[in-house]
Image (cartoon, helix red, strand yellow):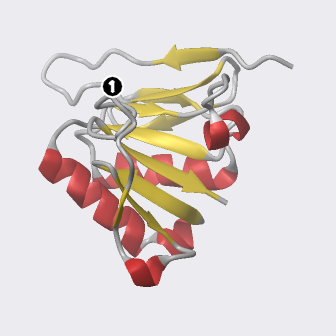
Amino acid sequence: MALRSSRVTASPAAGTTPARTVVSTASTSAVTYAASTTVSTSGLSGNAVKVAKAVNANFPQITSIGGLRSGASAQDHGTGHAVDLMTANKATGGQIAAYMKEHASELGIKYVIWRQHIWSVQRADEDWRPMADRGSATANHFDHVHVSVK
């Protein structure tokens, strides 16, 4: 079965927080978040949904969350076991990465990537480790925090 991505958003009312978005497969499965945002969760694992909900509750400035996608580089995204929390703001991304590390056990997190560094549960004693240059800001995770889950 080929995976097809879609973006589900709700427009905010004047003067309210912008809608939050999760990219996932097209479906009727949805969760309603704050600011009247409806987010498709079809194809995401339970732990990936938990991460998206935690971000929505604790980091309302995040308005785009990437989820299920297909393709050669999809890896955990291809099975619904990863989310990308879009932010180029270094302070916000750092706060999110620290939150994910702190709550890794309860959210079922395997690893977190932010600004060309990786932290994993399996190698937690090594803390944040540098990663090889993958070529672009997106590939090096300078514009989003990547979270892979069990």
Write the residue at 28% across / 19% down: 12
Q: Quadrant of residue 19?
A: top left
Q: Which amino acid type is marked by label 1?
A: Ala
Q: Identify the residue at the far right of this view.
A: 1
Write the residue at 67% across / 60% down: 150
Q: In the rendered view of the protein, which quadrant contains the N terminus?
A: top right
Q: Position of residue 108 (x, y in %)?
A: 60, 66
In the foreground, 31 or 8: 8
Q: Position of residue 11 (x, y in %)?
A: 33, 15
Q: Which residue is mark 1?
A: 19
Q: Quadrant of residue 94?
A: bottom left
In the foreground, 24 or 150: 150
Q: Is residue 107 above or below residue 46?
A: below
In the foreground, 81 or 56: 81
Write the residue at 50% across / 35% down: 32
Q: Is residue 130 above or below residue 74?
A: below
Q: Quadrant of residue 62?
A: top left
Q: Is residue 72 above or below residue 100?
A: above
Q: Position of residue 43 (x, y in %)?
A: 71, 34
Circle 1 crowding by C-alpha within 10 Å: few under 14, some 14–19, many from 20? many
* Label 1 residue SS: loop
